[in-house]
Every structure is written in C-alpha cells, then in structure tokens.
Image (spheres, grey):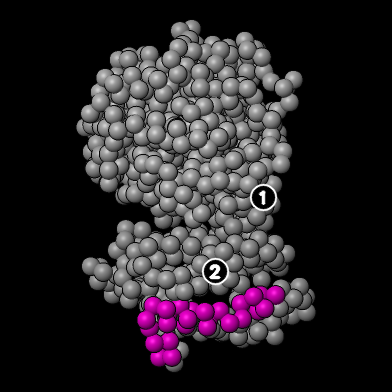
Amino acid sequence: MANLPEQIFTAAARYPERVALRSPGSCLSYRQMAEAVRVLAEQLQARGVQRVGLCGDNSPAWVVADLACLLAGVVCVPVPVFFSPRQTAHLIERAGLEYLLFSGPDAGAEPLAYGVWGQCLPVTPAPARMPDRTAKITFTSGSTGAPKGVCLSAGQMAATVQALKHRLEGVVLEQHLCVLPLATLLENIAGVYLPLLLGATVTVAPLQTLGMTGSSGLELNSLVAGLNQFHPHSLILVPELAMALVAAAEQGRLETASFRFLAVGGGRVSTDLLARGRGLGLPLYEGYGLSECGSVVALNVPDQEREGTVGQPLDHVQVSVADDHRILVRGNTHLGYLGDDPGTRTEAGHWLDTGDLGALGPEGFLAVNGRAKNLIITSFGRNISPEWLESELIQAVGATQAVVFGEGDPRPSALLTVRDGRSPERLRESLATLNAGLPDYARLQAVYLRRQPLTQAEHYVTANGRPVRHKIQADLPTLLASSFPLFMNPGATSVARTQYPTPGGANMTFFERLQSETAQARAHVTGAPVIEAIREGRFAIDGYTWFLTQAYHHVKHTVPLMMACGGRLPERLEFVRKALVEYIDEEYGHHEWILNDLEACGADKESIRHGQPDTAIELMVAYLYDRIQRGNPIAFFGMVQVLEGTSIELATPLGEAIQQKLDLPNQAFSYLYSHGALDQDHFEFFRNLMNDITDPDDQRAIIEAARMVYRLYGDMLHSIPLPSCSKEPRHEAA
C-alpha cells in the first residue's frame, strides 16, 4: 500500500488546480499544497530533526506541516491549542521533542515556508522510549489519569483512511469543514487525510471564528455563521456540537441544504437526537473509535446503519465482545505507548481491550454501552452505565454537560451544567419527565445545577469533553457545595406525581432545605430579563454602570451588617460569630473595587459614592438592618445565601459576555470576576455553616430573609435599563 503522502500526491496529480485547502483569507490548490509539502519536508530533513511538535490553530499551514512530517519521515506530535504552558512543557519533555513547528508566527521561531514557522528546542536528556516505525504520537484524553502518548505508524493511519474511504464510497463528499482542533486525531485523519485522498476541499478556519474556545467552549452564533458561510458537505462532531446544531436548526437559524454526512463520535449520542436532526436535514451518523485504533473502528453510513448502534466495524479491524461484555479489537492497533517497555507492547494479532462495554448484533452492528470501569453499582446491586444516563440527561434537559455519580447509593445523582438561564423549576419539570421514562433503579434522586461548565483547565474534562471521573469524584463535595440542588422524587412515574422534598425531612440537611424552600423566590432573580439580554448581546454600557452602582450601594453595607449581626448574636451562636470574623476579613474593601470598576467604565465614582441607590436596594439594606436589630440577627445569612449563590451562578459567565459585548478592559470587572471565583471558595464554607444551624427559629429566620432578599435583589435586576426594551422599574415587594 502506498503511504499517505504518495496517495495524496496522486490526487494532486489528478486534480492539480482544484482547491485542496481553504481558509477565510487564502486557498491552496492541490498542486500548490503538494509543492509546499515537498519544500517543507526538505527543510526538515536538512535540519536533521527526528521528533517534532506541531503547534497552532487550525490553518492550511498546520496541514502542510503535518504532511511534510509524514513525507520527511519525522515523528509528529500535535500539541493541542488548549494545552496550558505547563502541559505543553510536559509533552515536549515526555516526547523528547527537538523542534517545534507553528502554523503562524511565534516568539523565538524562524519563518520556514508557506506560513510555517520553526523553533529549535534544547536537547532532552533522556526522552521516553518510542516504538520503531512511529510516525505520529497522539496524546489520549486521559480520562483516568495522565494522558498517554499513543504511537501510530504511517501504515496504520493509511489503513484507517482507506477503510473509511471504502465505507463512505456511496457518499459524495467534496467540501469538508474542520470544526474540531486539527490536533484531534479524529479530525486529523477523517477530516484532513480522507478528504484530501478523495480530492475534496478541506476548509480550515481559526477555531475562534467558528465559536470554539479552549477544549470545551462554544459560541453557537459564530459556529452557525461559519457553517452558513462555508456550506460544507461534511463535518465531524462531538455530541455537544451535534446537540447545538440540532437546536439551531430547530430555531431556523442553520442552513442545512449542503450537508451530506455529519459524523458524530467521542461520546454516547441519544437516538432521539439523531432522529430530530435527520428530520431537520442534518444527516447525523454515529461512529465509534479510539486513538489506539487510528481513531475510527465502526461507523454508520447511509443504507448501512442500525438505530442504537455505532455501525459495523470497518474492514481494517476485527471486533469481538468478550463474555464480560468488553469490546475487543485487533488488526490495526497502535504500536504501543510512549515510554512503554518493549516487553509490555501488544503483539500483532492480539486482541486490544478497549475498556468499553458493548454488544454485537446478528448482522455485526456494534452497540457501545459505556466504560467498564465507570459502571455504577447501586446499593440494590443494579448496574448503571453513567454514559447512557448522561446522554439521556443532556438530551432531555438541553444541558451542556452531565456527570452521573452515586456508587453505593440507592439511586444515582447528577451534576448538570445548564447555561441558558432557565429557572430550576423549569428544569425540574424536564427532569421529572425524564425520570418517569427511566427504569426505576436509574431514576435520579438529586440533580445539582451549575451555570459554569467543568473545564479541562481544572482537569475535570478531557480534550474531547469527556468527564475525568476520578478527579470529579475527589472534588465532589466542593462541586456540590457550589451548585444548586434539585431533590427529585425518583419513585414518581409521571410528572404529576413529582413532589418537592418535605421541609425538614429526616434525610435533608438544613442547607438542602434552604435551597429547596427558596427555589421559587430565586426564580425571580434567574428569570430577570437582563440575563437573557446579556446572552443575546442586547446590553449597553449604561446598563452595566447602573448595575455596578446598585452593587456599590449594597456591598458598602456588607461589613457593617456583619458587624451588627455579630454584636447581636447570642452566646449559643458563638461559632457563627467566629465565622463572621473570617467573612469580614474577606469582604472588607470590596465596595471600593466596584468604584474602581465604575471609573474604568468612564463613570464619576465620587458622584456615585455620594448618590442614592435604587428603591429595591434601599429597601433590601434597610430590611436586613431591621431584622438584625428588631428580629433574629441570624437572618443576615439569608442575604449571604442570595448574593453568594447568585455570584457563583451568574457573575463570571455574564461578566465575560458583557466584556465581549462592550469591549471593556479587565479593570472594569474586578467585582464580577472576583466574586465568581471567590464565592466558589466561600460557598462550601457557607454550606457547612448552615448545616450547623439546628434551631428551628434560626432556620426559619434565614429562609424568610433569603426569600425577601431574592425578591428585592430580583426587583433591582428587573429594573436594569436595556436597549430596545423599555421597562418600568419593578418594586413589587415594596
């Protein structure tokens, strides 16, 4: 079999003037691309380098550099664009890289050819052992620990491409758009090598122009605009992107006429989502693979598919399912892992244990049911695949992320990321509907809502968005403390039977009761028009300065309120007084931060300092002073519940949206950004403190105060001025 560069050069000879690589600002014909690859390969050979790291954003230069490495016989190690400097340094040292290639200018690099830049690296004293014939090292996503370097030969990658070509021979694909990072092996092989082998045009655009940020960030409007601009025939999607495109198509925002084949992989996909997409003109086909097998093992295609499966195995591999339901693969597996001892490598012809669970149907269609090591066993001895339940959750609720947990519990629970501003009560309805359709042992007993996604930077998700379960499990108390809990009735068989937790129930902590009994009041905050307006980009500088002005007028009272509360607490609550000392130390001076933010926005901070707040804020502060002086001083913590919880949920994401819309400096967001982060740390402390409040009168005072503060703070948010949305101030509580 000819190697990949030779096969692509054959296509170049057949279609010399056809566009091979296209970007927003340029394009290369097949003839030009082949010439660029040859020139750069000669430069690499002249430098005598053997191990090269390939860095940079999606661009034609990245593809040229990658193909040049293959042609020159240089080991290529793609470096993900979202890697931190520390992760990149680890990769460089582990792989013993001698040289870095960049798909654009970079500090310390020299220009080579066709937009590619290069930089020599210091010699690594003892690089990790690498198998013979290694052509590419791709670092796995590391779902269970440190990422491993999977070593692949040029022949193994070529075999995968040929198998894909054979499987897709009935589909005419002439335009492919790369929406995943090129450092992702699946996009590299199926999104670049395969289309070029077919003589198609590969469009590569900077990821941010397509709405992709980091490893898991998505700005849907930009992605839809890019798809509507380029009109690709094919895409490679992860489940979250597939779900986003289905939503955009349902809203009539996405032009679907050009699509011919949209492959979905990297995680379990709901059959209902695939069906909805098909009905909207999105030809979604689920596949399955892993880096150790060249990225693709099985794939559904038109006229050769089965619902609920990932398709039949490609013809370059054999697939078997063991008695314990583990999926085994042989025939085109990796050479080994970087740094492995030669004696530990899998010999040719041996079965590779994928670690996945599945089943083979009578016609050879493969169903994948989750990871073997991820199985949850309930206290009743029932086995639950978290991937299956997470897929159902994401589909049913329209969530960004879902992580199911609950080993040894009667029923599972889930951590759910929802970023569209829907209230907990609306989400509860969707969750209740889902629960009603699940087997009784799989019904969720609790769901913890987050507004900020779990990120790779925090080591909670992998490069392709899969949850790093051992890390999440280790940090679960902190993650739950900073989330909003919804306690379900898993025994319900219909929405009508779903019940709220019984206040003061024996299985509820006071913190859980506080969340539950203030949920309705809290919806007045999360349902404020300003939240949706910010997400839609319908927000102006006067709205932001108005909000900051109100924030100043209540934050300046935070420390005085704490001091007043501490002075009135009875001796039996001495532990609360001690906690207030810590709070005061943290909170002192934050009102000055807000004035500095206002000054960075061009406002006159001194006039604001001596001005008057909105009526809702005036009433909120006065109410708290009154409760401390005339009622139960512990009521102060009702305000803490409201403001810290709101900060965690809204501060950082809304701050980022406002900054992007208004193009303001970081100096204008010290209050929002610090409170999004600081209150994450505070909230577990607050949770534990509330759980130590045992007196029923104290608990009732905190709940009542929280309801009132939600009402008044929500009135303030409802009164924020918005462009093209003239609303009268709402002071209903007054």
Secondary-structure class at tag 2: helix
Q: Residue furthest top?
A: 362
Q: Amino acid at mark 2?
A: Ser
State which mark lies toward you, 2 or 1. 2
Q: Which residues are magenta?
A: 582-607
Task: Using the image as rendered, state which of residue 449 and residue 659 is in the foreground.
Answer: 659
On the rendered image, what quadrant is the C terminus found in? bottom left
Q: Can the viewer see residue 518 in this picture?
A: no
Q: Earlier in the sequence, mark 2 or mark 1?
A: 1
Contact between marks 2 and 1 (CB within 8 A): the answer is no
What residue is disc 1 on? 475
Horizontal arrangement in the rendering, residue 188 relative to residue 514 (left or right) = left
Main structural element of the magenta stretch: helix, strand or loop? Answer: helix
The residue carrying mark 2 is 674
| Residue at image coords 69%, 47% | 474
**Alpha carbon separation for disc pair 2 and 1:** 21 Å
Q: Is residue 589 magenta?
A: yes
Q: Say above or below: 107 vs 701.
A: above
Residue 53's quadrant in the figure?
Answer: top right
The amino acid pointed to by label 1 is Asp
The x, y position of residue 351, in whole percent, is: 63, 14
Seen at 50% across and 73% down, the residue is 671
Q: Residues within 10 Å of mark 1 (few under 14, many from 20)?
A: few
Q: Is residue 141 above or below residue 602?
A: above
